[in-house]
Image (spheres, helix red, strand yellow):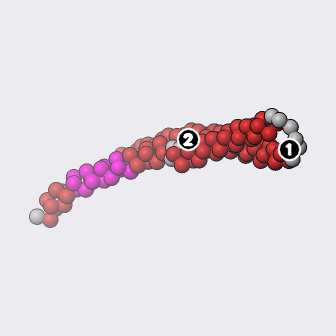
Amino acid sequence: MGLRKSVFGVASSLVGLLRTRLELLALEAADEKSRLLKLLGMAFAALLFLTLAVLVFTVTVAVLFWPTEDRYLALGLLAAFYGIIGIGLLLAVRHGLVHGATPFSATLEELGRDAELLERIRDAQDEDEAPSRRRGES
């Protein structure tokens, strides 16, 4: 009866441990989802501003042949402004992707700790069994 109770206790502990780790994984998945949506939005904005820069540049080239005084400068500055915004957003997206947190790092860290703990328990059991084996051999 004691062995059965011990097995159920271990199984209960393992289920609780697994439940905790899955909850952590779910939280990290939600964080990763929001991070990816933010990066996707920034990438969309970058593409929008780069498209506007190309459009304004095209209009600037077309207007070059239309003789006026300050329209060239205004359109050129506007195209440069849109281009700088677009490039800045693309660099921010790249930085977020390259230097962002590793997905599910907390879950992986906790699983690593669990594995180390189980390894220490197994080593301790091996050390406890070694003297009893020696006694049995003599």
- Pick the front one: 13 or 137: 13
Which quadrant holds residue 5?
A: top left
Residue at 21% across / 54% down in the picture? 127
For the residues bearing labels 1 and 2, Cβ distance under 8 angstroms = no
At 78% from the left and 46% from the top, the residue drawn is: 57
Disc 1 to disc 2, how far (Cα)? Answer: 52 Å
What kind of secondary structure does the magenta stretch mostly adopt? helix
Give neighbour class at mark 1: few <14, some 14-19, many 20+ (Cα, 10 Å). some
Q: Give the side of residue 92 with respect to residue 69, left or right.
A: left
Q: Looking at numbered disc 2 in the image, what kind of residue is underneath it?
A: Glu
Task: Give the residue drawn at x 83%, y 35%.
Answer: 69
Q: Position of residue 10 (x, y in %)?
A: 41, 46
Which label's residue is closer to the chain start, 1 or 2?
2
Residue located beneath label 2 in the image? 28
What label does residue 97 carry, if any?
Answer: none
Identify the image quadrant of the C terminus.
Answer: bottom left
Q: Position of residue 109 (x, y in %)?
A: 43, 45
Whether residue 119 is in magenta: the answer is: yes
Closest to the observer, 47 or 57: 57
Which residue was labeled with disc 1? 63
**Mark 1 is on which residue type?**
Val
**Does residue 101 appear in the picture of this structure?**
yes
Q: Is label 1 or label 2 in front?
A: 1
Most foreground residue, 74 or 46: 74
Residue 67 is one of the magenta-drawn residues: no
Name the residue at the right extreme: 66
Q: In the displayed structure, would residue 117 be above or below residue 27?
A: below
- SS type, badge 2: helix
Question: Looking at this view, is 100 or 24 the one in front?
Answer: 100
Q: Secondary structure at mark 1?
A: helix
Taking 81 as reference, is 29 left or right? left
For the magenta stretch, what is the residue range? 114-129
